[in-house]
Image: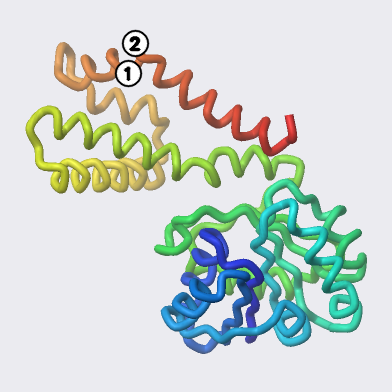
Amino acid sequence: MKVGIIGCGNMGSAIAKAIATDKQINIYISSHNSGKRAAFAEEIGAKFLSNEGIVKTCDFIFLGVKPGAAAPLLGELKAELAGSVGGVLVSMVSGVSLGELEAMAGKGRAIVRIMPNTPAAVRHGMIQWCANAAATEENIRDLLALLAPAGRLDEIDERLMNAAAAVSGCGPAFAYLFAEALADGGVQCGLSREKAMLYAAEMLSGAAEMLLRSGKHPGQLKDEVCSPGGTTIVGVHALEEGGFRAAAQNAVISAFRKSQGE
């Protein structure tokens, strides 16, 4: 299988790293940053191709450019898109709908929208997807198998894609901010920066696994940590006093509104 990635920014690179775990897949990348492209290609064993070459050659064509660049880029590739057969266009472009992509790339083209997040690079991503009518069951099956090393995949109604992106796409940045704040607190209490960051990161990883594996409501898991009159409930109270819950909700809502163009 031949996979091409146009645009190797943070998201394109994360997907490429996950796909590269299967050494039988040939990966081709295109990026305007030639220095970064060369180093990254060497890292994952990919080869260079022009945008036109990727469209003509690859079974899956991942589009990882900024939203404003999608229309001009696909416009430049209009002839190649019209002439090539079989290549599925896989868009990682935020806020650009299947209908808009069809208008740019041609209605006969199989198109899948995915919304990955950067933890895909370490095989713990969350990827939502939806497809147009031209995408066959075989196209979908092959794409899901291709992306399986990146993490968990979930089909979603396209109208909910921006909401999903606000939670799992933007969420890693929110989680990193929380981890940094926890570590800062640990340092203030006397821990070394290295140990405080390690403890915060491992705690977040373990708490996420507990939430996924136990099937329990997060409120119940929180209650199980909070002993009567103990240290944790005091800390929870401090978070609530600081508006922690509302701030987290507002972060998601603000990101969603931005993606909606509000």
Residue 49 shown left or right of residue 199 in the figure? right
At 83% from the left edge and 73% from the top edge, which residue is drawn? 77
Q: Amino acid at mark 1?
A: Leu
Name the quarter where the C terminus is drawn: top right
At 91% from the left edge and 70% from the top edge, which residue is drawn? 108
- Front-most of 148 and 44? 44
> How would you rate the neighbour count of disc 2 (Cα within 10 Å): few for under 14, some for 14-19, many for 20 or more?
few
Res 239 label: 1
- Front-most of 99 and 194? 194
Q: Are marks 2 and 1 in contact (CB under 8 Å)?
A: yes
Secondary element under disc 2, as helix, strand or loop, is helix
Q: Is residue 8 above or below residue 206?
A: below
Please provide percent x and percent y for residue 10: 51, 59
Question: Does the rendering let one see residue 24?
Answer: yes
At 67% from the left edge and 41% from the top edge, which residue is drawn? 162
Res 241 label: 2
Residue 234 shown left or right of residue 16 in the figure? left
Please provide percent x and percent y for residue 190: 7, 32
How many callouts does the rendering have? 2
Q: Is residue 183 above or below residue 87?
A: above
- Front-most of 11 and 207? 11
Question: Does the rendering let one see residue 19?
Answer: no
Please provide percent x and percent y for residue 207: 31, 41
Secondary element under disc 1, as helix, strand or loop, is helix
Name the quarter where the N terminus is drawn: bottom right
